[in-house]
Image: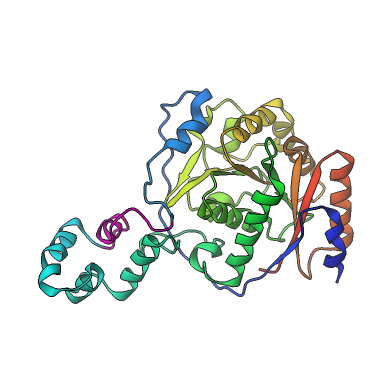
Amino acid sequence: MWFTSMKAFSDFSSMEVKSNSDELTMTEKADALDDKATPGEWLTAVQKSQSYSLASNRFSQYKLGEIMVMLELLSAESRDKALQQQEQLGLPFGQCCLRLNLIDAEDLSQALAWQFGLLTPASKAFSYGEDLVVISRPLEAYAEALRSISGRLMTSWRKPGRNVVAITSPGAREGRSHFAANLAVSLDQAGWKALLVDADFRNPRQHINFEIAQHPGLSRLLCGFAPDEVVRRIPYLHRLSLITSGPTPPNPSELLSRGDFAMFLENARNHYDIVLIDTPADNGFSDTELIGSATGNVLIVAHKNYTRERDLRNLAGRFRKNDVHVIGTVLNTF
């Protein structure tokens, strides 16, 4: 019952996120953007990139055959063969491909889902980390809860100049990185340009969740790399960009306390609808408070039957003493 009392923490209502989902799989490794953009143009270049043009929009502009080729469910030659036979057979394109044994029913289901904007695993050849439940099971209650949170975040909380938020938790194994990754995907699916930054130098997870290389990442950015060298695009997520943690630095707190991190966030907030920062667990480190002070806003994740109320209150109280806005708490039961 303690979670009900925690709603007084902020004006952004707390929400319970549940799921009984098992494992999930999806898509290929991401390529880094080319580095043609100058540092001052980096985020604009990221937004305009067409490296992965198949977006999870509703009612895709692409024809079903084109989608099948993009998802590598069908070769271009097989598509042309089906088009030639379609009129003779008098069948819709997908059914024609089934009749000709060019695809199976699962392939057709995936392609139709993409055509109508339902993001699902794109191909047996691609895989995402098992934490991205909102991709593999978009119709379950867990995904719907995340969509509700993302909607309230963007409509009730976000205001001009207030669009950077740190996702944090009192301790480890409370679902902070899991929640941040799934929230970022939900924002992408809702049409928002989002940037997810893995600032957890202690136990980074986002490169695992999205199955891309960890380097160069945020740690290299804060040591002089140009931003366009570290921003990554995620296959089949048209609006979501990711900055991984990068090589583990020996001095995480010192690196985050430099002015470079705050300058980076100020630049990012001007080019994205929302910026999510995945932080380390509090656990006595100063990293979380440093990140919270730089963002000015935090969303706290607690885990049902695991997080202690005292720890949650203490963390929120420390943020408030530093004039950091606690926009809400999320009770995670995944």
Q: Is residue 272 visible?
A: yes
| Quadrant of the drawing holding the N terminus | bottom right
In this orientation, which residue lies closer to the viewer: 240 or 170?
240
Q: Name the residue located 78 percent from the left edge and 67 percent from the top edge.
A: 306
In the rendered image, the vertical position of residue 49 relative to residue 173, given as above or below: above
Is residue 332 shown above or below 213? below
> Is residue 11 part of the magenta span, yes or no?
no
Q: Residue 118 in the image: state x and y as whole percent.
A: 45, 63
**Along the horizontal axis of the image, is 46 left or right of 298?**
left
Which residue is at 80% across, 53% downward?
A: 11
In this rendering, position of residue 162 left or right of residue 195: right
Q: Quadrant of residue 96?
A: bottom left
Residue 125 placement, left or right of 103:
right
Q: Please tell me which residue lies in front, 272 or 172.
A: 272
Indicate whether 52 appears above or below 140: above
Who's the residue at 72% across and 61% down the image?
Answer: 174
Task: Give the extent of the magenta segment.
Answer: 58-73
**Is 103 left or right of 186, judged from the image as shown?**
left
Q: Is 59 covered by the magenta stretch?
A: yes
For the C terminus, the quadrant is bottom right
